[in-house]
Image: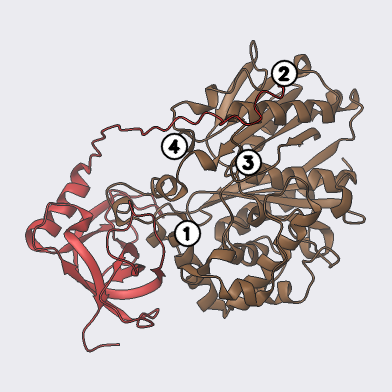
Amino acid sequence: MEPVAIVGVGMTEMRRERKADGYADLVYEATRKALDDAGMEIAEVDNVITVSNDFFDGRTISSMAVQDACGSFDKNVSTVEGDGTFGAAYGLMRILSGSFGTTLVCVHHKGSESQMPLITNAMFDPLYERFLGIEAVSSSALQARAYMEKYGITEEQCALVSVKNHRNAFANPVAQLPLELTVEQVLASPYIADPIKLLDCCPVSDGASAVILASEERAKKLAAKPVWVKGVAYCSDAYHLGDRDLSDVRALEEAARKAYAMAGIGDPAREVDLVELYDAFTYMELMWLEGLGFCARGEGGKLTASGDTAPGGRLPVNVSGGCLSGNPVLVAGLNRVIECVLQVRGDAGERQVDGVRTAVAHGINGPCGQSHCVWVLGGEK
Amino acid sequence: MGDWREDQELVVMEGRIKVPYRWFAGEVGTRYFESLRDERKFLGTKCGACGKVYHIPRRNCPDCFAECSEWVELGSAGTLETYTVVRRQHPQLAPLPLPYGYGVIRLDGADTGFLHLLYEFEEGGLATGMRVEAVFADEREGRILDVRYFRPTKGVS
């Protein structure tokens, strides 16, 4: 792959209800921050990808409603409905096409404006599934049980993820939900859909973020410190939950295998310094760690209990606080990429992990992680 | 943008989108729902190439991408592959009084699971691998809720 860099990143604060900002205001804030970070002006952006979801926004073609806020007048604009990691992958491809030197990718979400269960219910098939009332939490609970029973994963091991990631959020100024918790408090929180409890769940959030990608030639001309895209891949599993082995992570394994092959990574557990993954629910962090190849299947709980995934550990995971500490849907995946960029650059402030040369970011799309997108980012071309 | 907004209530416009839809079940779905409605029977479709029986039914096999050329009658009982008991739910969504369950159920004769409701179970009375059976609605309209829910099979654990 031709070298492509991420040269600018911007995130708004994630908050439960940002009433003073409409979603275009959030997009403007994130875009402005990304431009400032890159040392660019909007005229230097060759093309734009906007990422959104119509049901969440309560309007159709929602991705075309933020064009003034991301400065895309007179530019080639394309749109993605899905997680921000997928939008950024499309942005990368537009540079690789040779048609564009720079791509701005911006993502927005206001969970406060609608009612999350009603929206996530609508991702299910209207003939066979939707009118059963299933939504994101209860469908994920089916997956959590399938996974936990197959491998003997305990609710305590899942609770450790909640304790770790909410604590990590104290060092991240954009995080929504820094909490000092004990395992006992997580275990004592009420069941929503067992085995998932309240403190196993990500919050509802408002936020936006943006990244600017650049070809090698354009990146060289910028003052910003480039972070290079070493590998990107994505893969999807079946749509209907009953068609899948919900304890299985084959789509993630395939996406990770391809991304690592592009990046020349043979042993991710040794060669990756930091991971940001999509922990919408605590069990997901354990499952995705396995699917990303950082431990054997069923070992995610032990890996977490060992302390290796804590900020001072061998493989820090979600030092940003993860989705558990702020989950503007769609934005959340791009925020995983942005945290990796900041860590590779050494710009992560109070939460900076020493010596991050290679970082892995991960996003999901569809019910129970139907589709996975894996990014490998590094400081060297 | 200035200090005017101190002591101001920010404007929030309440709204609701009401858009009618007609989701077509197609020939495959129509036959399936007719069978539920008229005969209280679940039907699956069988791949002409690999022989896998799909429930819910579909026209083509996603694995070998061949046509599912044959209808197969399935049992109205099956095995629970995974489940959850829902304790909190948005009032517009819950089709049964809380707590109720969701399960992925593999009906007898099918090679895939399908999602449905679980009810009529004791607290702590569900387990992966247990046998469950369909409870049909008396009034059936040709839709998935013609099956009210599944419950643990009487006398069998």
Would you name the residue on which mark 2 appears? Answer: A46
* Chain at tag 1: A
Report how far apart the C-alphas of labels 3 and 2 lie in the structure: 22 Å
Look at chain A in the picture and name its colour. brown
The quadrant of the rendering that contains the N terminus of chain B is top right
Which residue matches tag 4?
A55
- Foreground of the two, A328 or B45: A328
Q: Residue at x 92, y 56 (%)?
A: A354
- Which comes sooner in the sequence, label 4 or label 1? 4
Q: Residues within 10 Å of mark 2 (few under 14, many from 20)?
A: some
Distance in Å between CA atoms under marks 3 and 4 = 15 Å
Q: Are marks 2 and 4 in contact (CB under 8 Å)?
A: no
Chain ID, mark 3: A
Q: Chain of mark 4?
A: A
B136 with respect to A320 (left or right): left
* Badge number at residue A331: 3
Residue occupying the point 90% across, 26% down: A220
Residue A2 at least partly seen: no
Q: Earlier in the sequence, mark 3 or mark 1?
A: 1
Whether pointer 1 and pointer 2 mark residues with C-beta atoms closer than 8 Å, the reply is no
Position of the C terminus of chain B by quadrant = bottom left
Q: Looking at the rendered structure, which numbered label has been put on residue B156?
A: none
Q: Which mark is residue A137?
A: 1
Q: Distance of mark 3 from mark 1, alpha carbons?
A: 19 Å
Mark 1: which amino acid?
Val
The answer to whether marks 2 and 4 sit on the same chain is yes
Q: Residue B72, percent across and down? A: 20, 62
Q: Position of residue A269 (x, y in %)?
A: 78, 65
Disc 2 marks which amino acid?
Asp
Q: Is residue B7 left or right of residue A358?
A: left
